[in-house]
Structures are given as structure tokens and as C-alpha cells.
Amino acid sequence: MTDLEGAPASTVDDDATVGFSRLAMFGVGTVGILGLTWFLVSWLVFGSPLTDAIGETVGSLAGILLIVSIIGAARASN
């Protein structure tokens, strides 16, 4: 007889749903729209080459993620 015999098959509640808060969804949507807008402005309005526009967008989004990470760490420490 093993230790697992007689144990329930799963202790996970299958009916529970895990999701993001409305604020998180709003933030993700806003950052996505801002990133797309910056890409289009850089590429179409400023006339940057496609690869430069992509690079600028990725760099901008990395900066935004860094700021969000710092804010999250500060909130978690309190």
C-alpha cells in the first residue's frame, strides 16, 4: 500500500477561475495601444525605417515594463 492510495484525485478546484483585475486589464490594453501607436507614428509619420521603428517600440515597451516592475516591487514591500 502506498501513501497516495486513498488520497483525493485532485485538490485543485476546477471551478475556480483565475484572471486579472480590471485595472490590470486596462493597463495591459493601454500599454499595447500606446506601443502600437508609437510604432505607427515612428514608421509612418517620422519616416523611420521599419527596423528602427520596431526597435524604438521595443525599447519604449521595455522602459514601461521596468517602471511597472519598480512600482510593483514598491507596492509589494509595503
Image: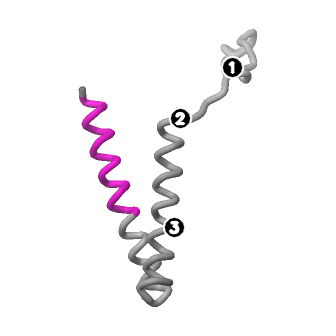
Residue 63, horizontal then vertical, whole percent = 32, 61
Q: CA distance from mark 1 to mark 2?
A: 23 Å
Left or right: 56 in relation to 36:
left
Residue at the spot 34% in from the left edge and 48% down from the top edge: 68
Residue 13, label in figure: 1
Q: What amino acid is found at the position of numbered circle 2 in the picture?
A: Arg
| Sequence-first disc among 3 and 1 | 1
Q: Is residue 12 above or below residue 42?
A: above
Could you classify mark 3 by the number of other residues whose Cα lies within 10 Å: few (under 14), some (14-19), or many (20 or more)? some
Q: Is residue 71 above or below residue 33?
A: above
Q: CA distance from mark 3 to mark 1?
A: 38 Å
Q: What amino acid is found at the position of numbered circle 3 in the picture?
A: Leu
First to last magenta residue range: 61-77
Query: Which label lies toward us, 1 or 2?
Result: 2
Q: Quadrant of the N terminus?
A: top right
Q: CA distance from mark 3 to mark 2?
A: 21 Å
Q: Is residue 67 above or below residue 47?
A: above
Q: Label 3, on which residue?
A: 36
Q: Quadrant of the C terminus?
A: top left
CB within 8 Å, label 1 to label 2: no
Residue 34, horizontal then vertical, whole percent = 46, 61
